[in-house]
Image (cartoon, rainbow, N blue to C red):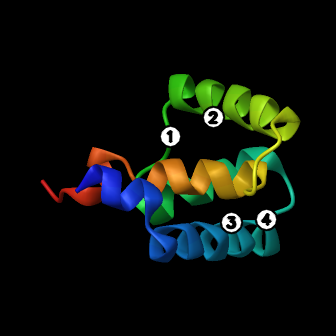
Amino acid sequence: QQLFALNSPFVLAMARSFAERLEASEKSEERRLRLAWQLAFGRLPTERETGHAREFLREAATADEKLGPWERLCHSLLTTNEFAFVP
C-alpha cells in the first residue's frame, strides 16, 4: 500500500494541492511548517521535526525533480504512517 501511495498520481496531485494551500496561506517557512503539521497530523511539529523539514526543503531545492521542495515535503507527509493511520 505504501508503494502505491508513493507512486500514485492521486497522491502526487494531493501533494501539489497541499503545497499550494500552504504557500497561499503563509509566507514564512516557520508558519508554513506549523500549518502543514496541523493540517496533516492535527498537531504542531516538534523542534526536531522542524529541523528535519527545513533540511529537507534545502536539499529538495537543489534536486532536479518533477516536484518542487514544498510539494516533495507535502508528499512525504501524506505518505507517513502517522497520516495514514488514525490512533
Q: Residue at x 58, y 66 (%)?
A: 15
Above or below: residue 60 compared with residue 72: above
Local SS, label 3: helix
Answer left or right for 74 relative to 1. right
- Kindly check if marks 3 and 2 are in contact, taking CB atoms under 8 A apart as contact: no
Question: Total label count?
Answer: 4
Q: Position of residue 68 (x, y in %)?
A: 78, 54
Comparing marks 2 and 4, which lies closer to the viewer? 2
Query: Which residue occupies the foreground of this view, 37 or 75?
Result: 75
- Kindly check if marks 1 and 3 are in contact, taking CB atoms under 8 A apart as contact: no
Comparing marks 2 and 1, which lies closer to the viewer? 2
- Look at label 1 and name its amino acid: Pro
Q: CA distance from mark 1 to mark 4?
A: 16 Å
Above or below: residue 15 compared with residue 45: below
**Mark 2 vs 1, N-terminal side:** 1
- Kindly check if marks 4 and 3 are in contact, taking CB atoms under 8 A apart as contact: no
Q: CA distance from mark 3 to mark 2?
A: 14 Å
Local SS, label 1: loop
- Look at label 3 and name its amino acid: Ala
What residue is pinned by disc 4?
Answer: 26
- Look at label 4 and name its amino acid: Glu
What residue is pinned by disc 2?
Answer: 53
- Which quadrant, please, contains the N terminus? bottom left
What residue is pinned by disc 3?
Answer: 19
Q: Residue at x 52, y 30 (%)?
A: 49
Is residue 32 something one can see in this rendering? yes
Comparing marks 4 and 3, which lies closer to the viewer? 3
Question: Residue 45: which numbered mark, if any?
Answer: 1
Comparing marks 1 and 3, which lies closer to the viewer? 3
